[in-house]
């Protein structure tokens, strides 16, 4: 039974992880697309990041809502090259980028309703 649970977790994680775009690809996509880039700075040891993944990003309706509005990028603070313009103190921190400039920064973990409220006016 435990092996089945682990396999299901790995499969679910792989499905949701595959929807994130690399930072480099997002910058290229934005040249052809008017959507802002949403970059999440995360860390594999961050409990708040994991909580937000489960509560917000794994929710099918919220995920669609975000994908309709943003090009989604996830950068691990320990393993990925985080651009120097993305100055953060906590994980998760969300940056919204348009034309190479940060237009909004949102630190911390949120539930669906609050995160939607914080991001709904970003264009």
Image (cartoon, rainbow, N blue to C red):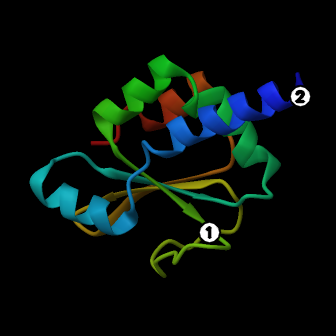
- Relative vertical location of residue 65 with respect to residue 32 in this rendering, above or below: above
Q: Quadrant of residue 12?
A: top right
Q: Look at 68% across and 39% down and name the residue there.
A: 10
Rendered residue at 58%/22% (across/down): 113
Question: Looking at the picture, how far across and down is residue 28, in whole percent?
Answer: 20, 64
Q: Residue at x 33, y 42 (%)?
A: 70
Identify the residue shown where x is 70% and y is 60%.
Answer: 43
- Asked whether the viewer can see residue 52, the reply is yes
Nearest the eye: 13 or 49: 13
| 58 up-or-down from 49: above or below | above
Toward the bottom, the furthest residue is 84
In this view, the residue farthest toward the right is: 2
Kindly identify which residue carries mark 1: 88
Find residue 56 and report its image quarter: top right
> Gap in Å between the C-alphas at discs 1 and 2?
37 Å
Residue 42: where, in percent of width, then height?
64, 58
Q: Which residue is mark 2?
A: 2
Q: Residues within 10 Å of mark 2 (few under 14, many from 20)?
A: few
Q: Quadrant of the C terminus?
A: top left
Q: Vertically, is 23 above or below 112?
A: below
**Residue sticking out furthest to the left:** 32
Task: Return the residue nearer the eye: 60 or 39.
Answer: 60
Q: Is residue 111 left or right of residue 46?
A: left
Answer yes or no: do the residues labelled 1 and 2 have beta carbons within 8 Å?
A: no
Disc nearest the viewer among 1 and 2: 2
**Category of crowding for the residue at label 1, using alpha-carbon neighbours closer than 10 angstroms: few (below 14), some (14–19), many (at least 20):** some
- Image check: 112 left or right of 70? right
């Amino acid at each position: 039974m435990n092996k089945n649970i682990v396999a299901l977790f790995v499969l679910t994680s792989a499905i949701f992880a595959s929807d994130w775009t690399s930072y480099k690809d997002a910058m290229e996509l934005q040249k052809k697309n008017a959507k802002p880039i949403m970059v999440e700075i995360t860390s594999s040891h961050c409990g708040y990041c994991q909580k937000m993944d489960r509560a917000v990003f794994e929710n099918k309706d919220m995920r669609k809502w975000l994908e309709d509005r943003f090009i989604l990028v996830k950068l691990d603070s320990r393993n990925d090259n985080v651009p120097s313009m993305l100055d953060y103190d906590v994980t998760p921190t969300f940056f919204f980028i348009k034309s190479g400039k940060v237009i909004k920064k949102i630190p911390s973990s949120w539930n669906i309703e609050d995160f939607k409220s914080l991001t709904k006016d970003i264009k």
